[in-house]
Image: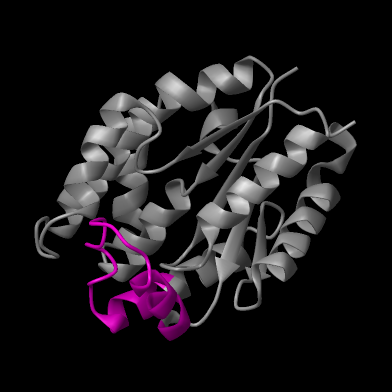
Amino acid sequence: MRGRFITFEGGEGSGKSTQLSRLAAYLDAQGISVVSTREPGGCPAAEDIRALLVTGETGRWDPLSEALLHYAARRAHLLETVTPALEDGRWVLSDRFADSTLAYQGYGHRLGRQAIETVAAAALGDQAPETIHPDLTLILDLPVAVGLARAGERAGTETRYERLAVDFHERVRLGFLDIAKAEPERCVLIDAEGPPDAVERKVREAVVEHLGDLMS
């Protein structure tokens, strides 16, 4: 049986990595084999591209170049990590996926939906729909100021997106909200402003509601 594909989306500081790790532990306790991964990244080639995207000066790339890099990384990620795991019956949890490119480059950088869809079709047109379209997407939402404050407390060098203007991040948040509204059968919008334990309960409830019949 094919595994299931769950993606975590949201702006900077929304707690995606924390909640993905907690959900992975919960699913493992249910006897489900889980692969935890991330974008950009998730395989050696895509991790190399990640370094180009999340470090350096904010103006390092123009918006279209950014989108192309994200989709180059995504194609490698699908081919090397996501698709093999799903075909092996494992559940894949990914910290970001295609919705982030639409939100960040399509909305944040104002490329628009059509440009992103054109790039996606060129990069992934030969991939099976079940690997391109997640079974469930959890969109962690919180005010931009709160998210950026949380992100600013993290150590590390992967701060290129965090350093972009606040109005960019406001457009990104709007993008995620529009995505959630447009695809309610796939996307669950979760208030991520509360404590991690409360957010974890909402994440678990969403997973059980949408995929619970496959967990036994």
According to the image, what is the colour scheme of the structure? one colour
- x, y (%) of residue 175? 45, 69
Determine the image quadrant of residue 72: top left
Determine the image quadrant of residue 198: bottom right
Q: Which is nearer the eye, 117 or 213?
A: 213
Give the residue displayed 27% in from the left and 64% down from the top. 161
Work out whether 157 lies above or below 11: above
Residue 44 as seen in the image, left or right of residue 103:
left
Q: Answer whether residue 88 is magenta in the image.
A: no
Give the residue displayed 53% in from the left and 17% down from the top. 84
Give the residue displayed 58% in from the left and 62% down from the top. 139
Check the picture and name the quadrant holding the N terminus.
top right
Give the magenta-colored segment's residue range.
145-172
Q: Answer whether residue 165 is magenta in the image.
A: yes
- x, y (%) of residue 86? 61, 23
Give the residue displayed 64% in from the left and 14% down from the top. 88
Q: Which is nearer the eye, 34 or 156?
A: 156
Count of marks, rendered view: 0
Task: Please indicate, yes or no, whether residue 122 appears anywhere in the rendered image.
Answer: no
Check the picture and name the quadrant holding the C terminus.
top right
Determine the image quadrant of residue 26: top right
- x, y (%) of residue 12? 41, 67
Work out whether 26 lies above or below 168: above
Task: Please indicate, yes or no, whether residue 16 appears anywhere in the rendered image.
Answer: yes
Residue 28 as seen in the image, left or right of residue 78:
right
- x, y (%) of residue 98? 44, 47
Residue 98 as seen in the image, left or right of residue 52:
right
